[in-house]
Image (spheres, rainbow, N blue to C red):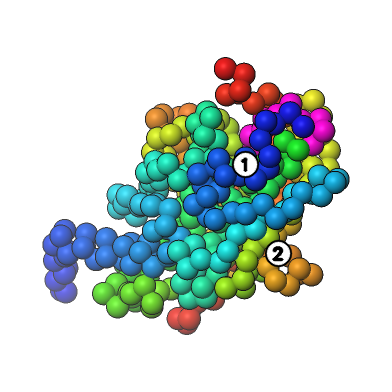
Amino acid sequence: MTERPRPEPVQIVKQRRDAALRALVNGVPYIQFMGFQFDRRGDELTAIMPFDESLIGNPLLPALHGGATAGFLETTAIIELAWQSLWEEMEQGRLDPTTLHPTHLPRLPKTIDFTVDYLRSGLPRDAYARARVNRSGRRYASVHVEAWQDNRTRLFAQATGHFLMPERTSAE
Amino acid sequence: MASPFTPQQFLDLLPHARALSMRLDSVSDDGRVTLSMPWDARLVGDPATGVVHGGAVYALLDTASGIAATLNPGSAGGTATLDLRIDYMRPATPGQRIRAEAYCYNMTRSVAFIRAVATDDDGSRPVATANGAFTNEASRAAAK
């Protein structure tokens, strides 16, 4: 009878996953420029756009710029897609996250189109977003993103986009 | 035109437009608004290629579209984006300015319908196109 391998210590698992996410997020200059952050619970990501004066598009209201909101949602969608592939590779042991470096990352999906619905004006506060991958094929993916501020059920924006997936280098 | 600002003054009032160094290049007699912004290493979305993130291109197209909506003769002075769809045709060439031209092709009492195109130095091949609906309303803060 083969003995079941002992599960890895929780800290090792967390370190590996957090390092992979950090490498992915820190590798994109625009994410640093906009100040976006990603919070991880298991494989679930929540994107955060901490409020900053430079995100304002209507100084009189004031309200967030629609372009900043769109950039936030598009980034959330791209990182979610890249994260799902990375997660799979990492958890199946095909990828060692310690080899990930901003200059050596998996290729990111490319946006084909992106449509944002603005449901209410973005307040001068932190914003949050989560992406749901509705379909992910070998070449194309369709992603829906929801963004909120104070209340999870009162979305201030939502978006749908289509993405071209990077070609996989490993044999499938 | 109901707005108390010139388009350049309006643009200078938008912190996010300033953050991306947007510039008003022209407003034609028929209401075509052209904005541009420089390529900037901080805006890169794909470190492997140096191509600017779609979000920055989106912000440029959205801003040009909003200005085109307020410059339409039927504008009540204020606007906000209802929805905007962007199609990305090709990556913008790293190092080149990105230009966005927006045009309000239909205006109703409450909605401005906009089309916009983004290009880099090769104006014959669009980087991205956009179309969307914007509100047509009195500037809320001015009314207060």
Chain of the residue under label 1: B
> What crowding class fits label 2: few (fewer than 14 Cα within 10 Å), some (14-19), or many (20 or more)?
many
Report x, y in % for residue A80. 44, 56
| Residue at figure coordinates x 53%, y 55% from the top left | B20
Chain of the residue under label 2: B
Report x, y in % for residue A59. 52, 34
> Which portion, as a residue range, is magenta?
B72-87
**Was residue A130 drawn as part of the magenta stretch in this picture?**
no
Instruction: Note whether A170 is above or below A143 in the view shown.
Output: below
In the rendered image, which residue does mark 1 sit on?
A: B9
Looking at the picture, tell me which residue is in the foreground, A58 or A146.
A58
Same chain shared by disc 2 and disc 1: yes
Left or right: where B84 falls relative to B48: right
In the rendered image, which residue does mark 2 sit on?
A: B119
- Look at the numbered disc 1 and give the secondary structure of its residue: helix
Looking at the picture, tell me which residue is in the foreground, A7 or B110.
B110
Seen as rendered, the residue at the extreme top is B144
**Quarter location, residue A20:** bottom left
Left or right: where A117 falls relative to A155: right
Looking at the picture, tell me which residue is in the foreground, A167 or B82.
B82
Instruction: Note whether A103 is above or below B107 in the view shown.
Output: below
Report x, y in % for residue A61. 52, 28
**Location of the N terminus of chain A (image quadrant):** bottom left
Left or right: where B30 falls relative to A85: right
| Residue at figure coordinates x 68%, y 68% from the top left | B120
**What's under tag 1, amino acid-wise?**
Gln
| Residue at figure coordinates x 49%, y 52% from the top left | B19
Q: CA distance from mark 2 to mark 1?
A: 24 Å
**What's under tag 2, amino acid-wise?**
Thr
